[in-house]
Amino acid sequence: MRNFALGIVDDDEGTLYTVSAMIGAMGRTIRTTSDPREAIGWVRDGLVDILLVDYHMPVMSGLDVIRQARKLSDSVVLLALTVEESPETARSLLTAGADDFILKPLRFADFSSRITLHAELFRYRQNGRTGGISKGLAESTARRVFSLFTTGEGMTASEAAEKCGLAYPTVYRYLEYLVAKGQLNRRAVAEDGRSGRPNVIYSIAQGGIQNR
């Protein structure tokens, strides 16, 4: 795997130490800070490819850091660190621009697999694609489409296209992109028990962006 730059912002020195040790065990280094503004500066200056962001911080919330970082870069991978795993928390993080979240307390096996997986996500973004999905998709539009599902309601591609005002083929590509990333689920549902082609319903995936 090619080199990639890591950073973390967390107001807890113990977490910064633990993450540094875990990254070191993976044979890598990581920038650490308790200052959200410094972390945002890393993104602005292109110094990090993957940024870990604590969800609960006193000066600036993790959500605010993620929003500002995402405005600065579509390619940086943003991972939230949180003790909360509710669907509402997952939706708020993903809508803000996070790519995934890692649950505290941190466990090395899960942490290292998340980092390895998202290093690949960053590489795909740099190449203009994600996991084999066609080029030409914008992360900002993907978040716009994803936001349609934050109420928990499922819908077809036609319904999503109507709600967001984009052409059906475009919305379909983004829906499949979000399914490939693990943000959405896809299921076939027979229409009122009728035979024939079922409706394909998309809905938000529970528990984060990537299937664990």
Image: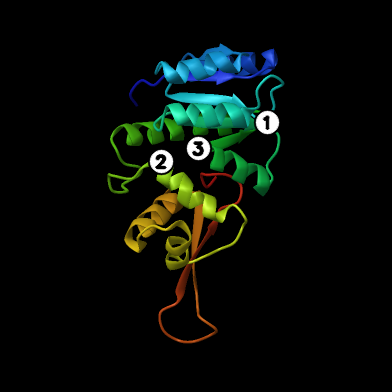
Q: Mark 3 or 1 closer to N-term?
A: 3
Could you tell me which secondary element the residue under label 2 belongs to? helix
Q: Quadrant of residue 121?
A: top left
Give the number of the mark in front: 3 or 1. Answer: 3
Spatial CA distance of label 1 from label 2 is 27 Å
Residue at (46% x, 25% y) in the render: 50
The image shows residue 161, relative to residue 96, as above or below, that is below
Q: Residue at x 66, y 42 (%)?
A: 89
Q: What kind of residue is marked 3? A: Asp
Dot 3 and dot 2 residues touching (CB under 8 Å): no
Q: Earlier in the sequence, mark 3 or mark 2?
A: 3
Badge 1 or badge 2: first in the primary sequence: 1
Mark on residue 99? 3
Q: Quadrant of residue 123?
A: top left
Q: Which mark is residue 104?
A: 1
Residue 78 in percent (x, y) is at 50, 30
Q: Residue at x 57, y 34 (%)?
A: 110
Q: Secondary structure at mark 3?
A: loop
Task: State which quarter of the image contains the N terminus.
Answer: top left
Disc 1 residue type? Lys
Q: Position of residue 86 (x, y in %)?
A: 69, 45
Q: Residues within 10 Å of mark 2 (few under 14, many from 20)?
A: some
Q: Is residue 72 visible?
A: yes
| Image: 185 above or below 40 | below
On residue 186, the disc is none
Alpha carbon of mark 3 to alpha carbon of mark 1: how far? 17 Å
> Within 10 Å of the Cα at label 1, are there few (<14), some (14-19), or many (20+) other Cα atoms?
some
Residue bearing the label numbered 2: 139
Estimate how packed mark 3 is, as few (under 14), some (14 to 19) or many (20 or more) residues with alpha carbons within 10 Å. many
